[in-house]
Amino acid sequence: MFNKILVANRGEIACRIFRTCRRLGIQSVAVYSSADAQAQHVRLADEAYEIGAPESALSYLDHKKIIAVAKKAKVQAIHPGYGFLSENDLFADELEKAKINFIGPSGKVMNRLGDKIEAKKIAKTAGVPMVPSLLFKSSDPKKMLAEAQAFAEKYAFPIMIKAAAGGGGRGMRQVHSKAELADKLASAAREAQAAFGDGRLFIEKLVQKARHVEVQIIGDLHGNVLSLFDRDCSMQRNHQKVIEEAPAPHISDKVREKMQKAARDLCAEAGYYNAGTVEFLLTPQEEFYFLEVNSRLQVEHPVTEAITGLDLVELQLRVASGEKLKDLVPKDLRSRGAAIECRLCAEVPEENFIAAGGRLEAFEIQSIDHARSTLRVDSGFTRGDTVTHYYDSLLAKIIVHADTRDEALSDMRETLSEASICGVKTNIGFLSTLLATPEFKLCSHDTHFAHQVLPTAEQLLKQAELHAGLLLVHRATATTESKDPWLSNSAFRIFSQPSYSLSAAVNGLKVSVQAQREATNTFRLSGSSLRLDIEVISSSPFQLKYTSAMGEGSIRFHVSADATWAMSSHGTVEIKEISPSLKAGKLAQAHSGEISSPLPGKVILVKAAAGDAVTAGDAIVVIESMKMEHIIRAPHDGEVEKLHVKAGQVVEANAVLAQLSPAR
């Protein structure tokens, strides 16, 4: 076994690996960018070394810097985690030359299986069912476009563009028409190049209504490969998994065995060793097709650990040091119970999952007092940490394991509803909504289902008004109101119950609400779309419990320097009050033509020039934030009067990008 290793990664996966190292008595070494100097993984490691600027290409993707640190720290091996260099065969080859162990497959095997194109060839040889695909013969953009158009004519739209060098949704685009093809090919190539240092792409026919089921594998250096059951990862947004579970539910034993055998056959054909995942598409008719191989540890590996009782990182370390699987994994290994994992991300689902950032003023995910389940939280953050735009939006992985799927699901929903996360907008409400759907309970959803449950504009307005209204009620019942009517926030009335009003931006959505006290503990809430009577059950300084026509509810509040954060079963929202003196000015600017960045990031493409005539929805600027591209579009028809940014420029949230002629 190794006595000292370096983890060439950051965030929760680096922290997770360090914990196993500590348990095994292995010294750990961290690397970090200047943006991560105070990060959790730096604090957990025994040693830490700065390797460069915040941009990944200048730090976490720089082979030479990481190898130099490994030599300086005199480590025996490097664990790549996932993302960054985890599937980079050149990095593995360089480590081999430097006589440093790579905790993963060899560069040769990684090149064959980590490359999505080569992996398809191996799968075909191994007899694994395949989806129709196109492997580009040329790297010339015009020729690629022609090849893609010919493929689409043969198999029909929709089709899927994918990055050859990696996964995780990077460089992936759905194309539904010929008109979208050129832009999406270029965008996918840029994103793949930024994420993996390799802009190569391939195309597949998009299989409709399919589930995403994968098989966990582990191989040793002695030619042995085991499959450690399966996982369902069908709940996805923007082609990235948000909820995973093990074992995959509602699959016949016959198909389950065939799928696991196909995974082992494919890996045997490739000579695979260490941890990896073989991914499949599963149709409603239980036909499965090979998707890709991730030649690394997966984000969702904790659900497999939960049902097997194994530590996959420990297995990786032991097989990399030469130990045999037969000595590490029980012959009678069985799947125990059910585990569900939710990915808590810093993003705003209702705004196309745009990345969010800021300081985590509260960050607590508590264990629910249920003897029937266990809670595990893997995170690279804690309260007080700052979430930047440079890296992935993942804040934490929340894993619940119970005897049955129904119990795990119920306890996960309760865990999410009791979490306290403030200062940064997250997808926690979206996760709760997904878990509550009949489709998830019955496992009848597919990889495109998640987008169908996003709230409509009308629903968002109603939720925003409800949160603002409940804040009014909380203030009226949890604090002692001044007896001086001129200092009170209520409307002073003779022989009448007081009325309260609030104008605020709730997650950026402007609302005006009123709360009319009908009796001591009864209020009528009203807004442009809200009419609701509520009765207060209890009100403490930080929590309000109430009942209404919708049933019993509970909401908690956290007050920060410039906002109030409201936490309920609908998720966490930011409420910023709008001063009466600013209302008119805010409304007047609503259609001024000023285009601002909704998030911090790096401008990677300017799609318009001063003087251009544009229509509503046209792309103006493309910003990369948290490893994803975000297109900033024209809010209305007009002419671009001025551009304030250029490609390569880093911008903060709310920075003015361009000036469009005002809307008429």
Image (tube, rainbow, N blue to C red):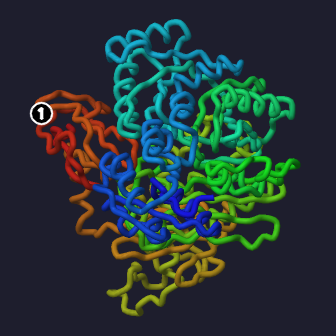
Q: Is residue 155 left or right of residue 423?
A: right
Q: Residue at x 38, y 58 (%)?
A: 69
291 or 488, nearer to the observer: 291
Q: Secondary structure at mark 1?
A: loop
Is residue 95 depicted above or below 563 in this figure? above
590 or 559, nearer to the observer: 559
Q: Residue at x 58, y 25 (%)?
A: 119
Q: Is residue 370 left or right of residue 348?
A: right
Asked whether residue 526 appears in the rendered view, the answer is no
Q: Quadrant of the N terminus?
A: bottom right
The part of the image, by quadrant, that contains residue 277 is top right
Q: Is residue 357 left or right of residue 589?
A: right
Q: Residue beneath label 1, please?
A: 610
Is residue 415 depicted above or below 328 in this figure? below
Asked whether residue 296 appears in the rendered view, the answer is yes
Q: Residue at x 49, y 12 (%)?
A: 152
Q: Position of residue 414 (x, y in %)?
A: 69, 64
515 or 267, nearer to the observer: 267
Is residue 161 depicted above or below 101 in this figure? above
Is residue 76 depicted above or below 482 in this figure? above
Q: Is residue 228 left or right of residue 143?
A: right
Q: Position of residue 204 (x, y in %)?
A: 54, 20
